[in-house]
Amino acid sequence: MYLTVAALVVLGAIGAYIAYQAMARIRHRKWIALAKRLGFTYRDKHYEWAKRFPFRLFDFGVRSLARNLVWSKTDTGSVALCDFGYWTRHWLSYSNRRRSQWDTSWAPGADTSSMGSYHRSQWQTVVVIESSQLHSPMVFVRRERVLVDWIKEKFGEPDIDFDDDEAFSDAYVVQGLVESEVKRTLTRRVRALLTQNRDVVYSVETNGPYLLVNCGRRIDPESCDDVLKLAIGLEKLLREYTPVEVAADASPAAPSDPLAAIPRPVARGWSTGAVALVIAACAILGGLSGIHVLHTRKELGGLAGRHYGTTTYRAFSPTRALIGLLVGGTLGGLTGYLIGKRHRGDDPAL
């Protein structure tokens, strides 16, 4: 019986691996066909491609890799599409020191089997455009996640809102170094284009002459034509932005070093999800403790002890239980909030 089950498990694993490899080959052929149709150059893998761009996405995780990279030079720069992936590290045991999943202090390829950790890959299809006609400031736009972003906003994470465009503000989180310049960059036509394509565009980043459009997931190469057209149209709209220095001098100014402006992920402290988990756990434990305290056996002494005996039990009361739950839950949640606020790190999670 056990041998049969083991054999089925092994056969299932082998079948899953063969199916995965077959799907990878099919996707590989589709990317080659896309490159031929567009007249672009194709490369299967590239480990150094992402390092030359000042994007926040390319700083996440470790061992970043551009797979199925297709690119071409243009009159003003270049355009490229690929499946970009990186690996994040996660801990299995809480006995180890807590680290953020963006921790890059460990050496890639090191043996971590005894550390209670594992690695998870994150893949998404991206379009990167480099154009000498772009002079955009550092802007980060990401699709909004209601609950997560509400918690992050309570902990002080910035989100630039557009009072005259509630649809865009509800759909995306916007961040940048200078709020006035960010609003000048994201004109009404740019915001309308992103709002209409919210299901396709997960995040957009601009920095100097560079533009990144991230789909947030791997998409079918046969649909990349539409994504490429969307990115090119967005790049043309972003050309309308003119930096103050360029407008004053009436001549294009050399952009500053984009790598100096991009914020780097910080891998210390707890993530926002961990803080929320601590608050919820403390609130639950506090509420249960409050109920338990109001229904614990009481030692009675003096006249009460002689009349009722040395001990007595309080009868269960729903009202008393509710009061204990509310008081204990409130105190527990407040304690969790203070603990999380003390240990919270600058998690750049999407």
Image (cartoon, grey):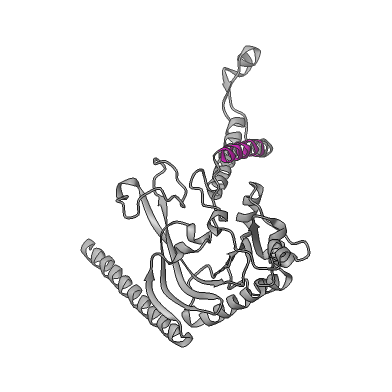
In which quadrant will I find the C terminus? bottom right
Q: Is residue 332 magenta?
A: yes
Q: Nearer the viewer, residue 306 or 215?
A: 215
x and y percent of residue 276 in the render? 57, 47
Q: Is residue 144 visible?
A: no
Q: Nearer the viewer, residue 107 or 237?
A: 237
Residue at the (62%, 71%) spot, across then down: 198
Q: Is residue 163 left or right of residue 107?
A: right
Instruction: Inspect the magenta stretch and tell me whether residue 144 lies in it.
Output: no
| Total marks placed | 0
Task: Tell me where residue 212 appears, x and y as whole percent.
Answer: 55, 68
Q: What is the magenta range?
A: 326-342
x%, y% of residue 146? Answer: 64, 59
Residue drawn at the location 46% of the way across and 85% of the way down: 39
Magenta stretch, main secondary structure, is helix
Up-down: is 116 above or below 188?
Answer: above
Tell me what residue is drawn at x 46 percent, y 52 percent: 102
In the rendered structure, the answer to whether residue 190 lies left or right of residue 17 reads right
Which quadrant of the figure has residue 187? Answer: bottom right
Q: Is residue 75 above or below residue 161?
A: below
Looking at this view, is 303 or 345 the one in front?
345
Q: Residue furthest bottom?
A: 37
The answer to whether residue 181 of the structure is visible from this angle is: yes
> Which quadrant holds residue 298?
top right
Q: Position of residue 195 (x, y in %)?
A: 67, 71
Among all residues in the image, which is located at the extreme left? Answer: 3
Quadrant containing the N terminus is bottom left
Instruction: Give the residue furthest to the right.
Output: 164
Instruction: Using the image, determine if residue 145 lies above or below residue 71.
Output: above
Determine whether, in the image, residue 263 is placed left or right of residue 303.
Answer: left
